[in-house]
Structure formats: C-alpha cells, structure tokens
Amino acid sequence: MPAKFHAIKALVFDVFGTVVDWRGSIIREVRKLSREKKLALDPAEFADAWRAGYQPAMAKVRSGTLGWTKIDALHRMILDDLLAKFGVEGLKESEIDHLNRVWHRLAPWPDSRAGLKALKKTRTIATLSNGNVSLLTNMAKAGGLPWDCVFSGELFHHYKPDPETYLGACELLSLEPAEVMMVAAHKNDLFAAKGCGLATGFVRRPLEHGPAVKNDLKAEKAFDINANDFLDLARRLGA
C-alpha cells in the first residue's frame, strides 16, 4: 500500500450507482407492479426516464425555482409526471407512495457488502449522497450496508457537487479533506471532491445504465485509485 494511503482515515461513498444498482432494482419492482396491475409498461424505459429526471429536478432547487427539497419529494414529483406520461391510471395513493420508496430498497451490487465490511475494519465509512437521511438509513437496513455514519446533502442543504457537501462531511468527521477519500462510480463527483482537497477513489460500474450503454470506465491519473469494485478498492487500501 502506498504511504500516502496511510493518511486516509475515512471514506465517503456516493450511493446511487456506486453502492447500489438503482436501475436493476427499479426494473424489478416496476415489472412486478405491471404484472399485478396489468400495466403496459416497459420497466427499463420507465427506470431510465425516472433517473433522467433527477438532475433537472435538483437544478430547480439550485436555481431557486424550488426551495430546499428532499430527494424523496423530488422523486415523487418526477414519478407523478411519468405516470401521466406513460398513461398509468388506477393506482392508489398507497401504491404510488410504495413505488416512490423503491429508492429506499435499492439492492447493493454483489461486492458492496463484503467490500464495505473489509474497509470498515480499518477506516470510518459513510455515505455522501444526495439521497435524504431516511432514504439512506432505510436502504442500509434493507441491504445490510454497514455504514458508520450516514451523510446526506440534506444535512447541508446542498446537493453534490456543491463544495458544501464534501467539506461538510469532512467537518462532521473532524478530519482534514486530505484524510478523507470520496468513492464514486461517477467522475464528475470525484473531480468535484478532488477540487475540495479530498482523496479520490474511482470504482467501475459497467452495468449501472444497463448492458447497452457504455460507461466511461477509463482510469484517470487524476484519481488516487481506479478500482474494479469495492473488494479491489479494499485490497489497494490494505484492508
């Protein structure tokens, strides 16, 4: 293990797509609902459209069009629009609410639990997600994710990649940015964290957007670690 990694005392993780398989999880739940309710839905198309509304919804908060809004509420706004767009009718409010909370039940990637448990032995591990705190804690319970802390943009009233999120997590950990590694499957997240002085760990998730989409999996010299999965990340950090 390179000497510079001895200074890393905590790792903070992006969650959607990095720790959990949002697309596969949503596809499964939409497929199940479609069968039960006899809905003419393409589960993959629906999942992709729901996720596609994520950044535009957060942009409304950043611009001031919306006040501070939890991701649960943004997900529901996007979902209501999608149900109308896809012509879905006849669902009860309880069924729509349950569907919206699929984001609380996203399944981890196969290596996530084992990799996190290995990393937890020697370092503090925490989320650093735009998902709200209740979403992240419910997801941890459902998926057996062994976080030491749950950090959310909700705590700072800022979404990543705003600097307040990365620096806020460091402040809550009482650590300098250089002592904290941001781990993500998304390069824009890592470049933003690096700009705030954090160490960076890129983890490849080639199937995040499905087998037909080619993600950018190229190693970046700017990142401290480029790993194939969490177990590879743990090995490189001497865990």
Image: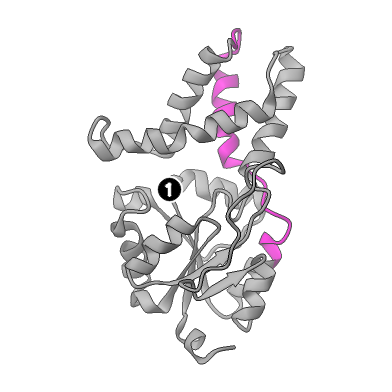
Q: Spot the residue most to the left.
A: 64
Please tell me which residue lies in front, 181 or 216: 216
Q: Secondary structure at mark 1?
A: loop
In this figure, which residue is indicated by the disc labeled 1?
Answer: 130
Residue at image point 48% right, 71% down: 223
* Whether residue 172 can be seen here: no
Residue 230 appears in the rendering:
yes
Q: Kindly indicate the quadrant of the structure image that contains residue 128.
A: bottom left
Q: Is residue 108 above or below residue 76?
A: below
Per the image, is 99 magenta? yes
Pinpoint residue 171: horizontal percent, then vertical percent.
Answer: 31, 69
Taking the magenta stretch, the answer to whether it contains residue 79 is: no
Q: Quadrant of the N terminus?
A: bottom right
Name above or below for residue 200 compared with residue 157.
Answer: below
- How many other residues sit within 10 Å of disc 1, few (<14), some (14-19) or many (≥20)? many
Measured from the top left, where is residue 74 in percent x and y? Answer: 42, 32
Residue at (47, 70) in percent of width and height:
200
Coloring applied to the structure: one colour
Give the residues in magenta.
88-114
The image quadrant of residue 227 is bottom right
Image quadrant where one finds the C terminus: bottom right
Instruction: Name the residue rendered at 32%, 68% in the picture.
Output: 196
Q: Residue 238: which quarter of the image?
A: bottom right
Q: Amino acid at mark 1?
A: Asn
Residue at 67% across, 30% down = 44
Residue 148 in percent (x, y) is at 52, 66
| 134 lies left or right of 238 | left
